[in-house]
Amino acid sequence: MSLYAAYAGNLDARLMTRRAPHSPMRSTGWLNGWRLTFGGEQMGWEGALATVVEAPRSQVFVALYDLAPMDEDSMDRWEGVGLDIYRRMRIRVHTLDGEEPAWIYVLNGYEGGLPSARYLGEIADAAESAGAPHDYVMELRKRPC
């Protein structure tokens, strides 16, 4: 099993049971020194897509999943790895149990553009369902779209 850190819609464990049915959520944590942003507006169906970029003094809430080998190809297809939309990247997640090495999907596009209201709401709902702090969820809900 490999450890996958979800930061957008995949924070929702119910959604992940459809995308990666053999991969349970293990815990939650933070990407310290990163921020959630959007880009690749021309790649998405309805506005810019979520990604993370390095940013001192910033944090991104994540859910950690024990990704089973049989679900990895499915997740790569879902995230558009073969279409060059996202790529995998190794990171360190800070949890209550210490630092965990994991991987995330990072957009292969420039930062910029706005997400749709529906997509941003989906991300905020997913963060809330994963147990993100109230102020983090409210900050997501107040972002421009």
Image (cartoon, grey):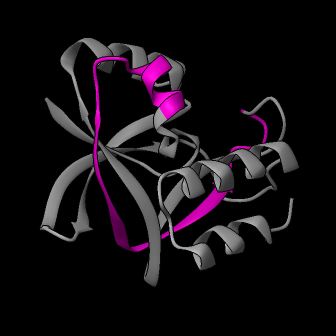
Q: Nearer the viewer, residue 131 or 64?
A: 131
Q: Is residue 118 above or below residue 37?
A: above
Left or right of residue 118: residue 31? left
Q: Is residue 136 above or below residue 115?
A: below
Image quarter of residue 91: bottom left
Residue visible at 56% across and 63% down in the picture: 36
Q: Give me the residue at 23% from left, 67% from top.
A: 95
Q: Quadrant of the C terminus?
A: bottom right
Q: Position of residue 43 (x, y in %)?
A: 72, 33
Mark yes or no: residue 54 visible: no
Q: How many marks?
A: 0
Front-most of residues 46 and 24: 24
Relative horizontal placement of residue 98, taking residue 93 as reference (left or right)? left
Q: Position of residue 49 (x, y in %)?
A: 68, 44
Above or below, 132 relative to 86: below
Q: Nearer the viewer, residue 114 or 42?
A: 114
**At x 49% / y 46%, what residue is drawn?**
11
Where's residue 132, x and y in %? 50, 65
Residue drawn 74% across the image and 33% down it: 44
47 vs 138, nearest the viewer:
138
Work out which quarter of the rendered image holds the N terminus and state it: top left
Q: Is residue 81 above or below residue 136?
A: above
Would you identify the image quadrant in which residue 75 lies?
A: top left
Q: Is residue 67 visible?
A: yes
- Residue furthest bottom in the image: 57
Q: Which residues are magenta?
A: 14-43
In magenta stretch: residue 18: yes
